[in-house]
């Protein structure tokens, strides 16, 4: 087992990994930017290293400074080297080059191999792997588009509307929908520009746009001894502009047969890709209940607590054990979907003003509590929300025997939760959890746009 792990991230996920390390009797080491120097979670560790100014490009995205911090931590105590780096999510979590750099320096990267990350992280290549695994994909290009003419010909063949995606994309960036050839021409240029800015890679691929689907993802774990298990699905249909807002498990919009098909498909994809660690495979399910694989996430996800609540399995702990070469201590038969868990992302954004990010000082922070309630957050009274980082303040998760009870619990929690004076997504969630369409479970990815157009 590892003795020391450096956490190459900040905020809520950094604190989450710190806690997992403590429970495993592993020393956590943190890096921080100048802006995060006074963060409360840094007080939970004995060693911290400043890696640069507030800008992510000069701190949390500087792999050389992060690895240097890991080596410096070891230099201060030669008998205790830094065994591994946990990247969290975002920043360098899906950067194959960073994974290679860590391992070249004899520091284990807590995640998949760089090769698996490259294959599944590239959406075009992931589609090829899916076909090899006999998993249905959305009709589209076999690889990246060579030029605009190829896109026009393919769109004509599969029919409009079509979706243009950045091959290296994520989080809705570099993604555009076109409903005609004229619109596709504009869309290709816009998507390339956005992809180059966001990912330094303007490669695009094209696929049929599935109208009003559900969005469902399957969580997997795979160790280095050949064992692969799924931990059922999470429904992430409630979103805006491809950014997830609410996740729940089980999905209220699929039947047991579709659930089984999705989970088996995720396991096949994992095996064909030679993937190890925690990962997620995402699918869209059309109006007729047919699922299509769309992409993979080669990291722990923001929404992992939903899976932890319904299965009782600590995913961060599992990631660490797998990276240390240990076998998963359970089989597929040991994993059960118990009750219903729902998560809301509490973001410092103003839903009434186009989800505009809200920076500033939080004077009063009063998270909710109670039976079956979990709040993962790094925020406190006096915390300053930075405009330079993601707007996530925390995650509110509830767990109850039934969906009706979970919704009632979430309503109560949202009424209790106080964040002042910063605007947050809480008021929107209060409306959603009282909306008849959401309560019925019969909604699609257009729910927010259709019901809350402002």
Image (cartoon, rainbow, N blue to C red):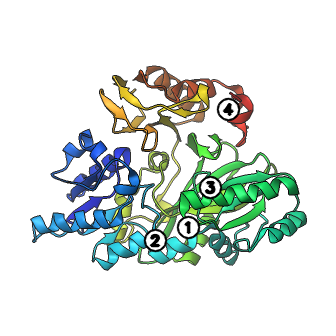
Tell whether label 1 touches label 2 (CB within 8 Å): yes
Q: CA distance from mark 3 to mark 4?
A: 33 Å
Quarter of the image for residue 95 reads: bottom left
Task: Identify the residue shown where x is 87% and y is 64%.
Answer: 158
Task: For mark 3, give the secondary structure.
Answer: helix
Task: For mark 2, give the secondary structure.
Answer: helix
> Badge 3 is on which residue?
194
Task: Identify the residue shown where x is 54% and y is 64%.
Answer: 200
Q: Earlier in the sequence, mark 2 or mark 4?
A: 2
Q: Earlier in the sequence, mark 2 or mark 3?
A: 2
Task: Identify the residue shown where x is 77% and y is 45%.
Answer: 212
**Quarter of the image with the C terminus in it:** top right
Quarter of the image for residue 137 reads: bottom right
Q: CA distance from mark 2 to mark 1?
A: 9 Å
> Badge 4 is on which residue?
438
Q: Earlier in the sequence, mark 2 or mark 1?
A: 2
Q: Earlier in the sequence, mark 1 or mark 4?
A: 1
Q: CA distance from mark 2 to mark 4?
A: 38 Å
Q: Earlier in the sequence, mark 3 or mark 4?
A: 3
Q: Nearer the viewer, residue 416 or 341?
A: 416
> Badge 1 is on which residue?
121
Q: CA distance from mark 3 to mark 1?
A: 18 Å
Q: Is the residue 415 above or below the residue 376 in the image?
A: above
Judge from the rendering whether residue 2 lies leftward or rightward of residue 360; answer left or right: left
Which of the two discs, 3 and 1, sits closer to the camera? 3
Label placed on residue 343: none
């Amino acid at each position: 087992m590892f003795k020391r792990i450096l956490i190459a991230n900040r905020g809520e996920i950094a604190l989450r990994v710190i806690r997992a390390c403590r429970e495993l009797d592993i020393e956590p080491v943190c890096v921080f930017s100048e802006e995060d120097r006074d963060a409360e979670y840094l007080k939970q560790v004995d060693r911290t290293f400043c890696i640069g100014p507030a800008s992510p490009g000069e701190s949390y995205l500087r792999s050389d400074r992060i690895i240097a911090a890991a080596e410096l931590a070891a230099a201060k105590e030669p008998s205790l080297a830094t065994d591994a780096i946990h990247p969290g999510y975002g920043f360098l979590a899906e950067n194959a080059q960073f994974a290679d750099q860590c391992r070249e320096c004899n520091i284990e990267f807590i995640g998949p191999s760089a090769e698996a990350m490259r294959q599944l992280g590239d959406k075009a290549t992931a589609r090829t792997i899916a076909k090899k695994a006999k998993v249905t994909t959305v009709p589209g290009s076999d690889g990246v588009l060579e030029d605009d003419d190829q896109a026009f010909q393919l769109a004509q063949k599969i029919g409009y509307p079509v979706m243009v995606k950045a091959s290296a994309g994520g989080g809705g960036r570099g993604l555009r929908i076109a409903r005609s050839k004229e619109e596709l021409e504009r869309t290709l240029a816009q998507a390339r520009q956005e992809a180059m800015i966001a990912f330094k890679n303007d490669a695009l691929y094209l696929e049929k746009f599935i109208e009003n689907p559900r969005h469902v993802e399957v969580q997997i774990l795979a160790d280095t001894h050949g064992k692969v298990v799924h931990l059922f699905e999470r429904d992430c249909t409630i979103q805006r502009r491809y950014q997830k807002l609410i996740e729940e498990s089980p999905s209220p919009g699929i039947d047991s047969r579709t659930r089984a098909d999705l989970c088996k498909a995720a396991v096949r994809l994992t095996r064909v890709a030679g993937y190890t660690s925690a990962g997620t495979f995402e699918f869209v399910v059309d109006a007729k209940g047919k699922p299509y694989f769309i992409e993979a996430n080669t990291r722990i996800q923001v929404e992992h607590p939903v899976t932890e609540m319904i299965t009782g399995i600590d995913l961060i702990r599992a990631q660490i054990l797998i990276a240390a070469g240990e076998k998963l201590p359970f089989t597929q038969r040991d994993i059960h979907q118990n009750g219903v868990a729902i998560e809301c992302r509490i973001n410092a954004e103003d839903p009434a003003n186009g989800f505009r990010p809200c920076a500033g000082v939080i004077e009063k922070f009063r998270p909710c509590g109670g039976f079956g309630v979990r709040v993962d957050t790094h925020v406190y009274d006096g915390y300053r929300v930075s405009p330079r980082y993601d707007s996530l303040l925390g995650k509110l998760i509830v767990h109850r025997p039934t969906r009706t009870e979970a919704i009632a619990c979430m309503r109560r929690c949202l009424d209790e939760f106080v964040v002042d004076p910063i605007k947050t997504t809480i008021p929107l969630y209060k409306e959603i959890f009282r909306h008849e369409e959401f309560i019925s479970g019969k909604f699609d990815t257009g729910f927010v746009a259709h019901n809350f157009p402002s």
